[in-house]
Image: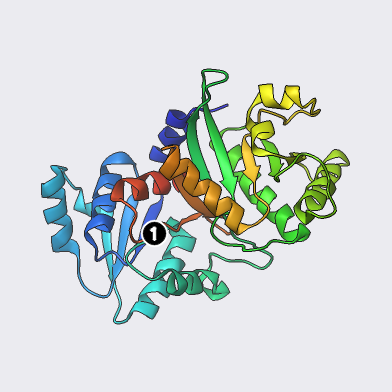
Amino acid sequence: MPTWKEVFAKGREFSGGVVFAGADDEDVLKAAVTLLKEFKGSVFLTSTTSVIDKVNRVADDLRVEVDLSRVEEVILDNEEDMLNEAVKLASRKGVLAKGMVHTAKFLKAVFTKQNGLRRDGDVFSHLGVFKWNDPESGYERIIGLSDAAINPKPNLELKIKIIDNAAKAFVSMGFENPKIALLAAVETVNPAMPETLDAAYLSKMSDRGQIKWQVEGPLALDNAVNRGAAEKKKIRGKVKGDADILIASEIAAANMLYKSFTFVAGLEMAGIVVGGRNPFVLTSRADSWEHKVKSVLLACAVV
C-alpha cells in the first residue's frame, strides 16, 4: 500500500495543467503559486479581470520564484462564460479546481456535458482521503471516505457507481485491490434499517463478481477499521478491521464523519470529486490555500 508521502509525490510528477476557476482571490493565488513550485505542470488562471500582477505580489510574499512561462491567464467578460471556459480547458489539460465562485454555479458548468468533463453515463462522487496513524498497528494508513458532498441519498445503483469511483481512484494512487467497507450503525442486517439491506445486497454482489471490488457490509465503523473490535464481534471476511475505503449510507452520515475526522480527530486530508473524464477539486471558499494545494495534488495523482 502506498504511503501519504508517496501519493503526493506522484501528484508532483504531474505534467499537465491545473485550471483554477475564479482565480481573483488571495488564497487561490497562493495555492497556484505554491503548485508552480510543487509540481511540473502548468497553471491556468481563469477570471473576469487580470490577476497576473497579483501573482507576482503573492509570489514575493511567499518568497517563491515564479516561472511565468508556466502561467496562463484566461479572462472572460462574465462569470458564466469564465466557468464554462475553465471546465472546457480542464477537460483537455487535466485538473479543474474551484476558486472564488459559488458552488452551484461551478457545478452547473461542470455538469454541462458540452464542456467536456462529464460524459454520458458519468456519475460524480466526492472522495475524501485521510492520513491516519492507526493506534492498533502503529502504522500510518490512508483511509478514503465517500460520498460527503455530491449525492444526498444514493440508491443501490448509485452506490455501485460511488464504490467504483472510489476504488478506481485508490488503484490510481497505488492500491492493488482496495478493501471497501459499507458503513451502518450495526454489522447485522435489520429490515428497519434500509442501509443494512443495501450493504448486504452489495456485499453479495461482490461475492458473485457482479461488483469487481472487495466489498463487505454492513459494518459499523469500529469493525471496519479496527481488527480487535471485529474479532471480538466474530465478524468474518477480508475487509473487517482493515478497510481502505469507507462508503457511507448517505450524505449526512458521510459529511458528519468527514468533519469528525478533520475537526475533532485533526486528520490531515485532501478531497476530490471523481467519476468524470478527469477528477476535480471542490474545496470550500473558506478552505485554506494549503488545503487547496493538497487537494489539487491528490487530483493530479489520480488523473
**Residue named by callout 1:** 284
Q: Residue at x 11, y 55 (%)?
A: 57
Secondary structure of residue under mark 1: loop
Q: Is residue 244 left or right of residue 43?
A: right
Q: Where does the image place residue 236, in percent across and percent down from the top left?
A: 81, 28
Q: Is residue 210 left or right of residue 9?
A: right
Q: Residue at x 41, y 33 (%)?
A: 9
**Up/down of 229 relative to 76, above or below:** above
Q: State whether residue 269 appears in this view.
A: no
Q: Quadrant of residue 246?
A: top right
Q: Is residue 197 left or right of residue 225?
A: right
On-image quarter of the N terminus: top right
Direction top: furthest residue: 138
Direction right: furthest residue: 208
Q: Where does the image place residue 122, in percent across and percent down from the top left?
A: 65, 63
Amino acid at dot 1: Ser
Q: Is residue 187 left or right of residue 260?
A: right
Q: Where does the image place residue 82, in percent across and percent down from the top left?
A: 36, 74
Direction front: furthest residue: 192
Looking at the image, which is closer to me, 107 or 236? 236
